[in-house]
Amino acid sequence: MSAEMGDRCFVDSNIWIYGILNEPQNREKARLARHYAVPGTTVSTQVICEVCSVVLKKAKLPDHEIAQIVDSFYDDCMIVNFDRETFISANRLRQRYQFSFWDSLIVAAALAADATILYSEDMQHGLVVDGRLKIVNPFCEEVPETAKNMSNSSVRVRFAPSPTGYLHVGGVRTALFNWLYARKTGGKFILRIEDTDVQRNKEEATQIIIEGLKWCGLSWDEGPDVGGPYAPYYQSQRMNRYTEVGEELVKNGQAYWAKKDAGGALPEWKIEKLKKQGKWDDEKAQAASDPSPALYLKVDLKGRTEMTFEDAVKGILAKPAETWLEEAAEGSTVRAAKDFVILRGNGMPVYNFACVVDDMDMKISHVIRGDDHVENTFRQLFIYEAVGYKPPVFAHLPMIFNEEGKKISKRRDPVAITLYQACGLLPEAFINFEALLGWSPGNEREMMPLDEIIREFSFDRIKTAAAQFTLSRKRPPPVPAGGATTDPEVEAQIVEWLSECLVGSKLEWLNGEYMRTLTADDLLARAKPFLVKCGYDLSQHSPAWLQSVLRLEQERSKTLKLLAENVKLFFVPPLTLDPKAVEKVLKKNDGMTLLKEARDLLAGIEEWSGTHIDEALKGFCERKQQKLGNVAQPLRVALSGTTVSPPIHDTLNVLGQTESLRRIDAALAPVMGQ
């Protein structure tokens, strides 16, 4: 096969050498090599040095021809330099795959170049590195069409949530990593709804999941609401398919129907009891038409002492084969394999069976999911063997722990993303934070736009240690904190508690950084729902005025919820003044006198603007030989009822002259002045 212009290929230096020398003894290799040496192919700087050396020694070409060859590399190829990160990656690869020193550098450079195919004569043909780079020996007798298996268009990943509740932070992280890998490779991201748990499924949960993913900015190429070539994308609509595959396994002798309890085959006494009750039928006990028997997969260990698979994140994972063996009967050393259910007595597929059938039918190339699914993967490998289908690449993501080092739980941790939406987090900040839960760009960067995360994302940068989702808790949650609730009062309590927990956290800091980047129009559009929820009447104000209000608190407010709360003084005049503020500011240092004189000064300003107000107040302070704070604080208490507000000249300007004077007069009145 020849490389296509759309492929991301990396060519080892020896193949370029064959293409250039075209020596008689290597003419066939040279012919093949030229198929791979297409413009746009990535090579390393080492290639140029090696080619020059070989050409000098073998071909004895004139210097000017050597220069032309070197120039051709720079004209036709993308050049990759070996930097510190490449050497670090090479060291990891050498330990994991037992590469030679040089081969590990070549593979690390290919990964750094975002290649999906590495053409090399020296390395193991067909080896897939880190789940995304396939090594192809073009001189192998199987001149491989298999290289196409790793082309960009063949990458198909999926997020398969169960609609039993809300979309939680762990689910978002799984969906995000799948989405990132699909976008990085040019593959497809599929949304599949695993709704076979009839008792726990909730129709509204599917919509909550879809809306949550859309809020996060994650779109899918195939799924329930967009369709696709492998529809339907609801497991509940694929029941006939699971039965069909199950019957095929029975036909091939790889599965059987039987009535068993948790301990295995039903004991004789239980069978006799069922017979007396008229609930047992010898013929139907082995018949697929009877709803009681379950379908069991015959576990075939094939003489293996352990089950293994290569994980794109964790490396080689192994489990002793005896895990799938029953205890030997008394007086015997023979241990039978532990067969397991794939279709329940009611016809519903178990998770592992439905998952394999769906992934097989939908041609899923990579299964990226949480570390808690490793056990499921071992079971699924038996099913893949039985159906005769090559398993996808598996990549298991690290667990997410809270600040106490415990796995996040809906009982003690706020895990529903609707809670974070209610706290006023921006989706781009939340998804940036989620990307860093178990993955790193390889440096100290933390604020990364989504397109940059896509560019940097790779399996080799996913950590194996648990990720930390750290909040700054100051008190226990008022109620179980994890999920959404239909009770508005309970939800309000959880949101207030979570808002407190966000203070000082990395997530809050990151959100604040994104808040500062928003334009005036964007900030107003996002803040409006929170302003309305605070009860502010926005109809009385122009968009320009609303934007000027938000601008004053944009720097200080780290969430949209806090932003809405911090601008309260511009919408709601203070009904009372904070007693502590009155005592500390108005009743000391001639506060009331300075407030009255400042009021008269402000009333005389003809052109009301922030600049003129600032100049007038500074001039007033010079004449009175007062610090600006001694004048600004009494005004602040009068305008807001507290000692906190944006810069005083900006606050006065946005409130307007009439409203500012009215509030000052109210503060000077006996009822307000206390």
Image (spheres, rainbow, N blue to C red):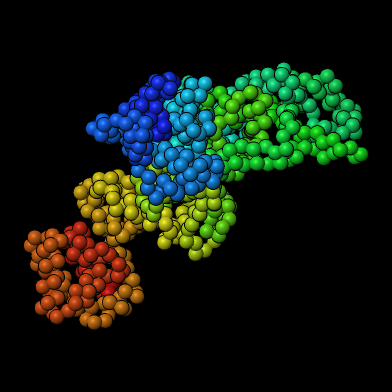
**Could you say which is closer to the camera, residue 115 or residue 76?**
76
Q: Position of residue 496 (x, y in %)?
A: 45, 57
**Could you say which is closer to the camera, residue 34 or residue 658?**
34
Q: Residue furthest bottom?
A: 589
Q: Residue furthest right?
A: 331
Direction from residue 183 to residue 301 in the image, left or right: right
Direction from residue 444 to residue 470 in the image, left or right: right
Q: Position of residue 562 (x, y in %)?
A: 36, 57
**Residue 37 figure quarter:** top left
**Could you say which is closer to the camera, residue 459 or residue 162?**
459
Residue located 28% across and 77% down the image? 585
Residue located 53% across and 25% down the image? 362
Q: Position of residue 367 (x, y in %)?
A: 54, 35
How many marks do you count on the picture? 0
Reply above or below: 23 against 130.
above
**Residue 604 figure quarter:** bottom left
Q: In this view of the protein, can residue 484 be seen by the observer?
A: no
**Could you say which is closer to the camera, residue 166 or residue 216?**
216
Reply above or below: 267 against 659.
above
Direction from residue 344 to residue 136 in the image, left or right: left
Residue located 83% across and 26% down the image? 279
Rendered-image quadrant of the C terminus: bottom left
**Residue 292 figure quarter:** top right
Rendered-image quadrant of the N terminus: top left
Q: Position of residue 501 (x, y in %)?
A: 46, 59
Q: In this view of the protein, can residue 128 be seen by the observer?
A: yes
Residue located 58% across and 55% down the image? 406
